[in-house]
Image (cartoon, rainbow, N blue to C red):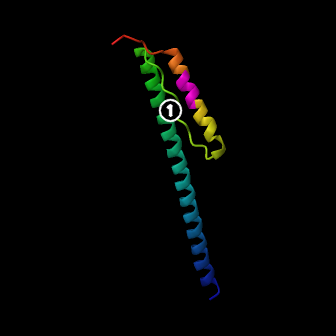
């Protein structure tokens, strides 16, 4: 009679391992999907930039990626402002042209 409880315990351990493996695979799939989405966004941005270059329009800035570091918030703002000023200097508004 002592062998029967071991079989149930082995089944329980096997089920725990399966559940753990499934959870691990799901986590990996989520990470892969995040990476794919990021790559697609990067490709779309590059395509828009290439299109803008062909049409002679100013290029878009890269989207600000959230790195969960709140200390850089001021730096992000100043970088955005610097990029904006660079665009103004690169393509100044033309007065009197409609």
Height in image: 37 above or below 3?
Answer: above
Q: Residue at x 41, y 12 (%)?
A: 95
Rendered-image quadrant of the N terminus: bottom right
> Residue 7 vs residue 87: left or right?
right
Front-lying residue, 45 or 80: 80
Quadrant assignment, res 48: top left
At horizontal 52% and vertical 55% (from top left) the residue drawn is 26
Identify whether 73 is placed above or below 91.
Answer: below
User: Position of 41 compared to 74: left or right?
Assistant: left
Does the magenta stretch mainly form a helix, a strand or a loop?
helix
Q: Position of residue 76 (x, y in %)?
A: 60, 36
Residue on which disc 1 sits: 42
**Residue 90 forms part of the magenta stretch:** no
Q: Position of residue 15 (x, y in %)?
A: 55, 69
Within 10 Å of disc 1 (Cα), the crowding (few <14, some 14-19, many 20+) is some
Taking the spot 63% from the left edge, 36% from the top edge, the residue there is 75
Q: Nearer the viewer, residue 73 or 30?
A: 73
Q: Toward the viewer: 54 or 85?
A: 85
Residue ID at (48%, 40%): 37
Span highlighted in magenta in the image: 80-85
In the image shown, does 13 or 84 lie closer to the viewer?
A: 84
Q: Provide the secondary structure element on which disc 1 rests.
A: helix
Q: Furthest residue to the left?
A: 98
**Residue 33: image x %, image y %?**
49, 45
Q: Is residue 81 magenta?
A: yes
Quadrant containing the C terminus is top left
């Amino acid at each position: 009679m002592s062998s029967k409880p071991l079989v149930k315990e082995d089944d329980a351990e096997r089920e725990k391992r399966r559940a753990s493996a499934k959870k691990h695979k799901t986590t990996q799939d989520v990470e892969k999907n995040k990476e794919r989405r990021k790559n697609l966004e990067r490709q779309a941005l590059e395509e828009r930039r290439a299109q803008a270059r062909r049409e002679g329009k100013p290029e878009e800035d890269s989207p600000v990626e959230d790195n969960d570091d709140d200390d850089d918030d001021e730096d992000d703002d100043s970088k955005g402002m610097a990029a904006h000023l660079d665009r103004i200097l690169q393509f100044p508004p033309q007065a009197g042209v409609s």
